[in-house]
Image (cartoon, rainbow, N blue to C red):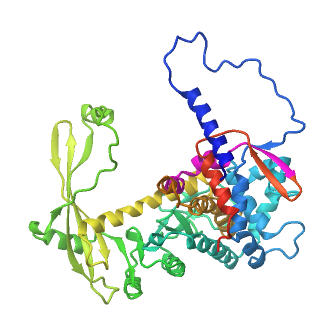
Amino acid sequence: MNATIRRQLAARKRRIARRIENQPGVEGQQPMMAASNIHYEIAERTRAIAPGGIGAIHLLARKIGLIQDLDRDLHLLKRHLPYHESDHVLNIAYNLLAGGSRIEHLEVRRNDEVYLDALGATRIPDPTTAGDFCRRFAEADVERLMDLFNEARLRVWKDQPAGFFDEAFIDADGALAPSDAWCKAGVDIAYDGTWGYHPLIVSLANTAEPLYLVNRSGNRPSHERADVYLGKAAALCRRAGFRKITFRGDTKFTQTKHLDRWDTDGVRFPFGFDARANLVGLAEGLPDLQYSELERPPRYTIKTVPRQVPERHKDRIVSERQFDALKLLGEEVAEFQYRPVACEKTYRVVVLRKKLVVEKGQLWLFQPDRFFFYITNDRTTPASEIVFLANDRCDQENLIAQLKGGVKALAMPVGDLVSNWAYMVMASLAWSLKAWSALVLPETGRWAEKYRAEKRSLLRMEFSTFCVAMIQVPCQIVRTAGRTIYRLLSWNPWQGVLLRLVERLHGRRLC
């Protein structure tokens, strides 16, 4: 960005820093929020929108070729009167980025004249038209849509530094998507009594991007079709240039009949393994000398000085009322060789032994040891590191929580399984656009370390925080010959990042 914009940003930052600085002074005679004579008027000349960052997102979608790909390769409309396929797909994703959470909120967007001008649109699809578009999808069309998203993803990944491609960690898990509707086709009752769907999510842990989402009936097992989409994800990452591939999943995703094939393909895997009686017997039969203590790294590093630990009120109440509380005394790891029935090869099994007691008031009631097993074809990494590597898959739960509660991609607003699958994939584009906006940011130059930290923060940011920081930026919209100008009306600490993103997108084409 040029020197003038830098000076303007610095001046705005200084002004707000002076206002919020905690300075000693005389006691105030009235509340800080003292506005009282408030009036509203209709602006005649100034035209503005709240989600001003949507322009940068649209510029990103255009620059990476996503819009062109959708219109060229996704064929769902016989005639484009007036919308194209890209209009429908981006309309659903932009609605969620702009602050909407339901398909019905499209009605607010399409009645916002300035929002339409900001995107250069005469009009956008209404909720019923968007629902009709979802119902046009067949299963093959949804697969094609995910492939188009992944083609754009490859273009974004291509500009990443060499270290980015050291190893791809691909995680898989299922998630329940409840529905109270009585007439949705494809719903069924899940293992916990919930009615709804049971989507499969296959994601890249490096960037927390959902690579494949597959909608399934609510009573389907978690691992169903996981081997197919894990294979597709591995092929995608190999095309991108990743030098190593690692699959991770819980006990349901081990699928021993596929382990030999994955091992032959050069894929590393640390999967959770069911604690069956024969494995527990083998673990109990290991000499104690083969077990070593597991020391987990601290959850965080104290950056200032240690503070006094506050009282744990829950523990106090449990102790006072003589409730049973399960306490962990320690963890130990060991390993042995094991060949599952469905495999022709022998694999390494890492066993985690947890020492537990039940605390009842001041009494300790010792419990039998609990065993957790991990099967892997990695024969060199220390056993403790295998446990940590497998446990890191739990971070995918944060992505699933964001897709469910932040993006609302698993809302299932349409009438049947495939149409809801299509909506889920299009809605998840909002999260992918968030990730891509972080990945395309440059991290070189004089402030490389600062830029790298901002990039990591943006990539790990929750969806709602991202929308507040980067999208909910009030902008005046000025349309001139050949240009649409977003004139920033306020300042926040992420505004410099937003302007660097726009500057990057106006540079050379991402390819």
Can residue 369 be seen here?
yes
Can residue 184 be seen here?
no
Q: How many marks?
A: 0
285 displayed left or right of 447 = left
Q: Main secondary structure of the magenta part?
A: helix
Where is residue 281? Give x, y as percent.
18, 72
Q: Nearer the viewer, residue 12 or 51?
A: 12
Residue visible at 76% across and 45% down in the picture = 487
Identify whether 505 is placed above or below 308.
below
> Quarter of the image holding residue 86?
bottom right
Identify whether 303 is placed above or below 182.
above
Q: Nearer the viewer, residue 172 or 186?
A: 172
Where is residue 19? Give x, y as percent.
59, 27
Q: Nearer the viewer, residue 256 or 399?
A: 399
Residue 383 on the magenta segment: no
141 displayed left or right of 16 = right
Identify whether 499 is placed above or below 69.
above
Residue 455 on the magenta segment: yes
Where is residue 136? Give x, y as percent.
77, 71
* Start-end of magenta stretch: 454-479
Where is residue 193? Give x, y as percent.
51, 57
> Quarter of the image holding residue 394?
bottom left
Instruction: Give the position of the C terminus as an image quadrant.
Output: bottom right
Q: Nearer the viewer, residue 206 or 343?
A: 206
430 displayed left or right of 272 = right
